[in-house]
Every structure is written in C-alpha cells, then in structure tokens.
Image (spheres, rainbow, N blue to C red):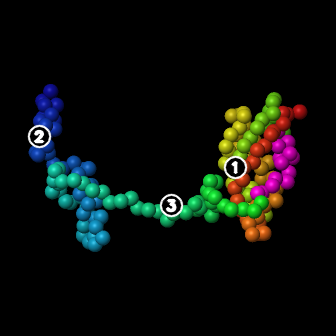
Amino acid sequence: SCSSKSSQDARSNPSDASPSIVEKIADSLQSTSGPSQSQSSAASPIENSSANPSSTISFPPPKKEAWMDTLTDLSGIPAPNAAVLIEADPIPQNLNSVAILISQRYKPKVPVELTLRVFVTEDGRIKRYQMLRTSDPKLGPEYFVHPLLEMRFSPATQNGKPIATWTTLNLKVPKAI
C-alpha cells in the first residue's frame, strides 16, 4: 500500500516528476524541424529536458513521398481508376475458352459470374488483375489466374497506336460437365 500511495503522489504533483518521454520527443522534433538544424541538435535530441507544459507543441508536416504525386505504382502500371482517353477498348479474343478452363479447374455445380478489372498490355496480354465481384465467394485466384494468363486481347488504341490500359472483364464460367 505504501508504493501505491507514492505513485499517486507523483501523479498528483506533476512539477516534481521529470518530463515524460513524449514531452522529450516532442521537444526534440520541435528543435530539429527548422530549416537550419545543426548537427549537434540532431545528434542528441532527447537531452533538452526543459519542457514547458503550457507551450503549444507543433509537429513538423509529414514528409511527402515521390510516389504520392503520381497515378502510377512503382512497377509503372497506372491505378485501375486512372482516366485514359482511348479510341477503342481492348477486346477479348478467347473469352469462352478461358471461361471453360476456369470451369475445368474450379468445377462449379452452377454457372458462376466473375467480374475482374484487368490491365491489358500493348501486345494484348493481361499483366495485372483486380477481382471486383463473383457470384461464388469460393472462386478464388487459385482457380482463375493461370487461365487468365492465356487470355489474349486486341489492345486498346490511342491515336492509332496500341496502348496498355485497364478494362473490365465479365466472365460467365459454365457449370462443370
């Protein structure tokens, strides 16, 4: 009971307690956030123990990363919702055969609808996919990724040249025979 009373006294009288680690870190951030920070203040930021609880603490703004300015991820593929002006959408060439391949792998008892967002390259191959919805939640990527790799498209065009773009793909997977 003696130790709990002394800890209560320390909490009730904050002027006797040393500055908390949070106050020390806040002070170090404040002292190093200026444009002309010196090497000595950056080397030992926690040594400043003159915390003034009545002063307002302002934190530096978050650092902005280079990739936040673009609609492209690190692999060079634009985001699925990025707007691209195209003359003609990519057209799937072998949609039915891919649906049959998925059916052979998955073996559904009833027909299944699968909606995907796919990134089609300039040569008509799928490079990325994003599953939007399926009528059967058990139909996972392990059943449709390999057949998708065999799918071919006539690529989208822009100014008469083929370009890579995202498109929505609706597959109707037939029931297994």
Q: Let me know if residue 92 is in the magenta part.
A: yes
* Of labels 2 and 1, the one closer to you: 1
Which residue in the protein does label 1 denote? 117
Q: Residue at point 76% right, 44% down?
A: 170
Q: Nearer the viewer, residue 156 or 72?
A: 156
| Circle 3 residues within 10 Å: few <14, some 14–19, many ≥20 | few
Q: Secondary structure at mark 3?
A: helix
In-image side of 137 versus 88 (left or right): left
Identify the disc placed on residue 97: none
What are the residue bounds of the magenta stretch? Answer: 89-103
Disc 2 secondary structure class? loop
Quadrant in the picture for the C terminus: top right
Pointer 2: what residue? 13
Q: Which class describes the residues within 10 Å of circle 2: few (<14), some (14-19), or many (20+)? A: few
Which picture quadrant has residue 96? top right
Residue 122 visible here = no
Q: Nearer the viewer, mark 2 or mark 3?
A: 3
Residue found 58% across the figure and 60% down from its top? 71
Spatial separation of the CA atoms under disc 2 and disc 3: 46 Å
Query: What residue is shown at x 11% (from left), y 46% (from top)?
Result: 15
Q: Is residue 2 visible?
A: yes
Picture quadrant of residue 121: bottom right
Q: Disc 2 or 1, which lies upstream in sequence?
A: 2
At label 1, the amino acid type is: Arg
Q: Amino acid at mark 3?
A: Met
Residue 68 bears which disc, if any?
A: 3
Q: Quadrant of the N terminus?
A: top left
- The amino acid type of the residue labelled 2 equals Asn
- Count the marks: 3
In this rendering, the answer to whether 138 lies above or below 51 is: above
Q: Position of residue 82 (x, y in %)?
A: 62, 57
